[in-house]
Image: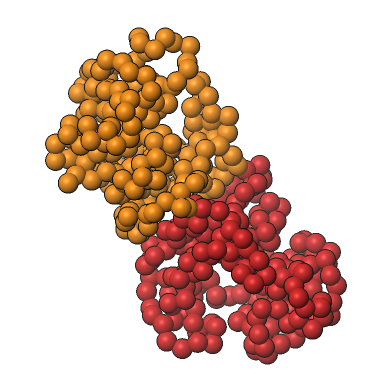
Chain colours: A orange, B red
Amino acid sequence: MNRLRSGITMSLDGYVAGPEQSVENPLGIGGMRLHEWAFALAAWREQHGLEGGEENASSAFVEESLANVGAVLMGRNMFGGGSGPWGDEPWPGWWGENPPFHVPVFVLTHHARNPLPLEGGTTFTFVTDGIEAALAQAREAAGGKDVVIGGGAEAIRQYLAAGLVDELSISLVPVLLGGGERLLDGLGDAAIALEQVDAIAAPGVTHLRYRIVR
Amino acid sequence: MNRLRSGITMSLDGYVAGPEQSVENPLGIGGMRLHEWAFALAAWREQHGLEGGEENASSAFVEESLANVGAVLMGRNMFGGGSGPWGDEPWPGWWGENPPFHVPVFVLTHHARNPLPLEGGTTFTFVTDGIEAALAQAREAAGGKDVVIGGGAEAIRQYLAAGLVDELSISLVPVLLGGGERLLDGLGDAAIALEQVDAIAAPGVTHLRYRIVR
């Protein structure tokens, strides 16, 4: 069966977003510092329709992360916020007219709405009946390819707690945010064990890959 | 000037000891799981007077950590507990007659007592006038060699917060403890920045090394 994978960037003190997250600043105070390693990369910039950027030891990691992805799962906040200033329907999410996914994306939400097809192969489908139903739809849409949980942290945590994730990568950056949203809180009792697969040191970040065993 | 270094093992969810730490169980529930990577190593076993053990990618890291150490700083709980069942004087600490340090050790405490010389070159000296005074004494005793903060987490955190640490290594293990003592809490506002030096993947652990810039 295709794997369920996820990857996220975390500060050395365990945060995936800084304090005072809001609709205007979803990464919280200081949260942009988490992603500086990625913004500089040609592989990241190309995925987001930008030119230039550099090659370094992160490049192969990013390219591998983006390969063999058949569908994406996403929490509602990562799609584009719960109670923003927009009405529920016309808001197309954070992602613009041509989102960087280029595959079907399934959004976990409590608000039913029609699928939102956009340019470049991304269609957002809104799933209201829980994480397992969303995963089943994503697996179906992915064909034989992997399903990736794009974020946010709460969605990743829910899938981890349910023992449904096969591989987790954490890109650990030497930043102390001092507060915000933690990725791995409340998972100490989850019936999962992690096996370290490898660790890749790159400029300003170490990419840690884990296999998850139920 | 000789460097102030520290190294500690941390769970992927940020804990250096599990929940319910006590005098009888200073590592807390599950805390021994943090150190399994070390117990298996010949380099660790030799330092603790044990035979056998294996060589793997952690060996060079451990040997390097143990090299060029002229003195050790230690919190009172790591020496051997605050309010244990013993009186203040006769208690020789956790460490037995021949502690694994073999250099002068300076213990941060509020209780003055006479120095405690033991076998193998370890003398515990008890310092009651704060972390900077202890560091000055340790630097003097270390000659040109480095000073290492042996732990516990609170001592490391105090020195980090004061901007006195030059190098920090974190041995990150794929364990979720779900609670306990965090190494890096409350440091978000410390006027320090970390630069990643390298990361060494080894069986069951990744050793992350950081240079600290004030």
Residue found 31% across the figure and 28% down from its top: A129
Q: Nearer the viewer, residue B68 or B60?
A: B60
Examine the image and state in which quarter residue B126 appears: bottom right
Counting labels gives 0
- Mark yes or no: residue B69 visible: yes
Residue found 38% across the figure and 78% down from its top: B55
Q: Which quarter of the figure is the C terminus of chain A placed in? A: bottom left
As drawn, B210 above or below B76: above
Residue A202 percent coordinates (x, y): 39, 50
- Mark yes or no: residue B143 visible: no
Examine the image and state in which quarter residue A121 appears: top left
Q: Nearer the viewer, residue A54 or A106?
A: A106
As drawn, B144 above or below B183: below
As drawn, A57 above or below A18: below
Left-right relation of A114 to B48: left
Residue B46 percent coordinates (x, y): 50, 84
Residue found 28% across the figure and 32% down from its top: A134
Residue A178 percent coordinates (x, y): 60, 42
Examine the image and state in which quarter residue B139 appears: bottom right
Residue B102 percent coordinates (x, y): 64, 83
Considering every residue shown, the one lying at the far front of the view is: A129
Left-right relation of B15 to B186: left
Q: Nearer the viewer, residue B150 or A189?
A: A189
Left-right relation of B129 to A93: right
Residue found 24% across the figure and 39% down from its top: A147
